[in-house]
Amino acid sequence: MSKPHRSATGGVGGRPRDPQIDDAVLSATLEVLGETGYTGLSLEEVARRAGTSRPAIYRRWAGRAPLALAAIATRLDVPSPPDTGCTLCDLAESFNVFLAAYRTIRPEVLSSLYAECASDPQLRARYLETVIEPSRRAVGRTLDRAILRGDLRTDIDREQLLDIVGSLVHYRALFGRQHLTDAEAESAIETLLRGAAVDYPALVAHSEALEQEHRGASGGRHTHPIAT
Amino acid sequence: MSKPHRSATGGVGGRPRDPQIDDAVLSATLEVLGETGYTGLSLEEVARRAGTSRPAIYRRWAGRAPLALAAIATRLDVPSPPDTGCTLCDLAESFNVFLAAYRTIRPEVLSSLYAECASDPQLRARYLETVIEPSRRAVGRTLDRAILRGDLRTDIDREQLLDIVGSLVHYRALFGRQHLTDAEAESAIETLLRGAAVDYPALVAHSEALEQEHRGASGGRHTHPIAT
Amino acid sequence: MSKPHRSATGGVGGRPRDPQIDDAVLSATLEVLGETGYTGLSLEEVARRAGTSRPAIYRRWAGRAPLALAAIATRLDVPSPPDTGCTLCDLAESFNVFLAAYRTIRPEVLSSLYAECASDPQLRARYLETVIEPSRRAVGRTLDRAILRGDLRTDIDREQLLDIVGSLVHYRALFGRQHLTDAEAESAIETLLRGAAVDYPALVAHSEALEQEHRGASGGRHTHPIAT
Amino acid sequence: MSKPHRSATGGVGGRPRDPQIDDAVLSATLEVLGETGYTGLSLEEVARRAGTSRPAIYRRWAGRAPLALAAIATRLDVPSPPDTGCTLCDLAESFNVFLAAYRTIRPEVLSSLYAECASDPQLRARYLETVIEPSRRAVGRTLDRAILRGDLRTDIDREQLLDIVGSLVHYRALFGRQHLTDAEAESAIETLLRGAAVDYPALVAHSEALEQEHRGASGGRHTHPIAT
DNA sequence: TGCTAAGCGAGACGGTACGTCCCGTCTTAAT
DNA sequence: ATTAAGACGGGACGTACCGTCTCGCTTAGCA
């Protein structure tokens, strides 16, 4: 998934890159990111810890931001979209999908990295594609299933609903008192679904029915039953 | 609003600080922020443009982040909470209140500045208080009026609703396709109010009634009527 | 005259070396030497100008110094020892023989190149043989003729006299106010011959006689008559 | 005698330079010069050994060459001009005066350093003044005494005689078989004085008389009597 | 009013990190 | 088998900037 500054395999000839350096540099980058954040990330220090030199890093990545992004990309969970058949539960679970990135990478690292991407459209695109989009796509699939089931009003803007759900997670992670708790997530989904659902009480009933059915099952998927 | 690093009036005697330097530095800071963003903000360059020296800056602010925050604080609009009596309209307008900061300061400047605040709790608090809270308080007052009017369900979490509204603006400003348009704002508020209102159709009716009443008035406050 | 690092004909089979590269590299080397001196001579730049690659250079010469020496060798004049039958004139002319190298190569190039040869005895020997010895041998032959004619005292050390004459040229070229002028050369030879000759006045008389004899001849060899 | 890149005491204000760094850098420079010669002198290595940083060096000296020159200047002997009353002996001793620099600094270091000075007239002047001139001035005084005593022909060019003597030393040190031996020095001076003296036999006689007089004296100054 | 000392301004310092040039070597494909 | 050329890993460069220290000057409060 790493995007080298200059393609390592582009030229036919030439000495091949030492793949151990790739790994060592990415590891060292994550190490430094964890200790000092993106602001304190210096290629000098990364090179030192990776046991290599700065030019070897520049040969692989165009600078600090692309390096950090590549390092982060190696650790980002691939989010799995929830699908229990229960729209209420699936959407409540969606908050966790959006939270995935923040469980492995500290929020301020992501936000300062993103800030540096602002001036470079290409880098910005890569950031969005790497960090934001996977979660968004996963939740999008969940949402599509709800729409297929006819659970949502037909005039609901799919993208907007995704934005609302996703943004709440980001906001709380970046600026909020703390990460969104399960209770808060359920409460927020309740409000949103009351507004977005064709028949909210029916969704609640369906959720409770599934809950009943799976009672006692190990690792039951309905860990977040919501009462009206 | 500036918070000097060390109190200028701490010592009884001594040469007084040159107030022109304060202004020149803050202006230069905004200038550089506008050109290079927070990442490219160097105190060296600020001092150069302000016609002073780096120690003079350090005497007033503890570093790059506090300086940038102080400079930004001089330009932030004080948001005015909308109050038309129409809950629907007021809340739709609230998105604009949250957007206030981003109209004067580029989003990436704010986000990278915030990222640097992450490691310093005190600075982080000042950032939130300066940049985030004013808008939040303004919208909060609007929300309180809606609650007082009995327009919202009593089990609605006021803070959470504020978060949802505010977060959407931040998310779109930072990561989104573009800033929230009026149409999108109205659509989002519709979804939220359908879920949060005691009687959504009544709110719509009320809004339309007010709209009728003010028809033809110049600069009418109901510029965003919403149909069911 | 070039001395390849590794023999080009060492292996029986294999792709033959491109002789155009030899020429292009030597030319480029002289070009760069002329612009930046030996200190600024970079193989990278030479390869760039020669339209080839660094390994192709390393294959032919062992490094910077041997390359520079080879390039210089292609341009060094082969000095012609003066022989007019007039010891006074021949020796005065000898200064010009020693100056030959400095007319084509800038003194500082030669001296810095030599400095780098210091650590490598083999290279040093090649430098001396290439740059210093030809002139020395040429003047040596002139000196031998003077000795054969019985013009010099028998206890004169031939090598030492060569050293004295040659060193004066080198010294003036490297450290002096300017290159030795003809007048200075004549004056120096006068002093030296007064000390070295069996009968200095006789030499002067002989010189004047030859001068008289060739008067009016075009391109006369006695261009530097010396009066007592 | 060191000439800082930018005067340390030029500005009234400002933090004063740490003089220990000056010493440490000069020492480290001599150390590296001794090990690798001027060509291998890297400021990085000097900084490392001196326990400081490259900028601290650049603040004091304009680059590699000025630094090396300053370091060398701290070790150059101040030559003492011989004065025994015996022109023959004094001049023979003069070769040792010229050799002084090469006894403390390896010839190739001096010559490569000088080569780098070639492109910078100011630096070149400093080199000549520091390395060459002191010896030249010392021998010049000796020569002046000989002239005052009326030992030399009046039409002898003082500067040229200095050049001849000095150049022989430099030449032998840089390009020669080995440093000039005492016997060679005496022999060279004999040749030169035969040509330059008003009455060479008288000088020899005087030398022998002095020799007789001081016979048996410990550390007698006439260690190099020369027979006709 | 004159004295004292605290604080200010600016300059320069010691040092970290930057992004780049170049070196000398290794690798592949072609001859 | 050996070449030509591209690319690699790494050493060193000269510079921008950081955060601090030092100086001389300014000014307020006390004698």
Image: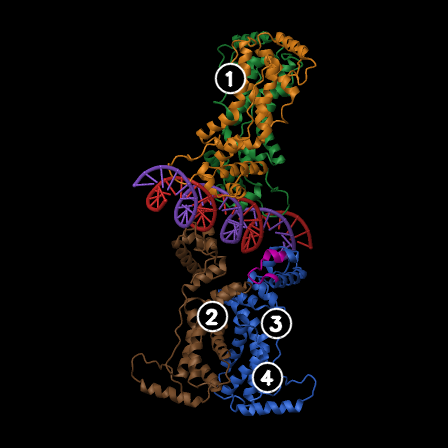
Chain colours: A green, B orange, C blue, D brown, E red, F purple
Instruction: State whether residue D47 appears in this view.
Output: yes
Q: Quadrant of residue B111?
A: top right
Instruction: State whether residue A133 appears in this view.
Output: no
At label 4, which amino acid type do we have?
Asp
Mark 3 burial class by Cα count in 10 Å: few <14, some 14-19, many 20+: few
Q: Position of residue A139 (x, y in %)?
A: 59, 21
At label 2, which amino acid type do we have?
Ile
Give the Cα distance between marks 3 and 4. 20 Å
Q: Position of residue D121 (x, y in %)?
A: 54, 64
Asked if labels 4 and 3 touch by Cβ distance under 8 angstroms, the answer is no
Q: Position of residue B143 (x, y in %)?
A: 55, 15
Q: Is residue A73 magenta?
A: no
At label 1, which amino acid type do we have?
Glu
Instruction: Classify mark 2: helix, strand or loop.
Output: helix
Asked if labels 4 and 1 touch by Cβ distance under 8 angstroms, the answer is no
The magenta-colored residue range is: C35-47
Q: Which residue is mark 1?
A: B159
Give the Cα distance between marks 2 and 1. 84 Å
- Chain of the residue under label 2: D
Q: Which residue is mark 2?
A: D132
Give the Cα distance between marks 1 and 4. 107 Å
Q: Quadrant of residue D181?
A: bottom left
